[in-house]
Image (cartoon, rainbow, N blue to C red):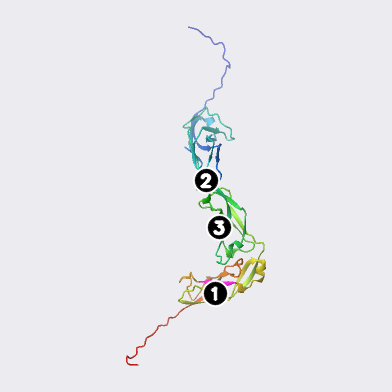
Amino acid sequence: NVLIEVESITPSEATVVFDIYETIAIPVEPAIPNITFAEGKTKDESEFRCDPEVINITGPAAQLRQIKKCTAVSRKSAALDTSYTLANDEIVLYTEDGTIIEQSPFKFDTTSFQIYVPVLTQKTVGLTLGISKAPSSFDKDSISFDYSVNSLTIASKTSKLEDIPDTIEIGKVLLSDLKPGFTQTYPIDLADYINLSNVDTVTVTLNDEGLASKTLYIDNFEISNAPSNYDFEVITQRTEITVVGPADIIESITSKDIIADVNLSNATADTIQGESFNHDVNYSCPNYDNVWVATQSNVILTKTEKTTEEETTENYPDNMY
């Protein structure tokens, strides 16, 4: 037997830290630093995820509290044009300020994750505002608008770029609401498309350069498509309207250029109750395809039920002739 005597220990003192081992659950974020996307393609951030989505980490409680972020990282390089699933290569832990944390004090319930990379087709599209209740003779292209943003970048799960339209209609406006100075804000609702532009609303302004308006008084009303069992008459004497169009045309236009049509094609027993009732007027200016009436108005009509004459047949003696 060998007897060993310890003469000294250096250092002579040691600091011992006692801690409690705990387990925390923390979300896992995917990271794909070397993945790019083909032209016209982008990643769907809302569906970009790991499976599983949570990791359980066991270790000293004080050090666990430093963990503010966990990523599953794939180092694979690829240019994706369709959705893809990758296996992670490593787990990386971060402090609140983004410092990478040494992992040796910790144990993980798993270190294997699948990273789902959903790929969308994206396109930058123009904007349009639809014009409603315009006469068939009116040229809608004669009206132009200015938009607070001229385009939006949108995306779809479709794999074909041509399936996405070149323009998106952001809303509609009645032709009768368009006057010089018109401006309106519309919310962006893309239905089946994903808005990548971080724009929630678009303000539309009528481009009224070169336009003018004039007040006219209309008294020549026409009734069309009236139910055959009534006689109708407009008793409103006249209506006041505003016409809008190119300044040179508006200067010379008169009420004779305006057709005021009281179209009863949709009239029902409920809408024409009583001896008199109100009905809207459809205005048009068929002589000019770039002039419109910026007015909504009603007139009062009366109706009279038509009487039917019953034909009578006389019986004559057979030997009359």
Q: Name the residue under label 3.
A: 171
Q: Is residue 250 left or right of residue 233?
A: right
Q: Name the residue under label 1.
A: 222
- Separation of disc 2 and disc 3 at Cα? 25 Å
Give whichever of 41, 304 is nearer the camera. 41
Q: What stretch is highlighted in magenta?
A: 258-263
Across and down, in percent, residue 164 comes to: 53, 51
Query: 10 Å neighbourhood of mark 1: few (<14), some, or many (≥20)?
Result: some
Give whichever of 217, 165 is nearer the camera. 165
Q: Name the residue under label 2.
A: 120
Of the numbered discs 1 and 3, the one sitting upstream in the chain is: 3
Can residue 238 be found in the magenta stretch? no
Circle 2 SS class:
strand
Using the image, tell me which numbered label, if any, was put on residue 160. Answer: none
Tell us which disc is closer to us: 2 or 3.
Answer: 2
131 vs 71: above or below: below
Name which residue lies at 53% across and 47% down: 121
Of the numbered discs 2 and 1, the one sitting upstream in the chain is: 2
- Separation of disc 1 and disc 3 at Cα? 32 Å
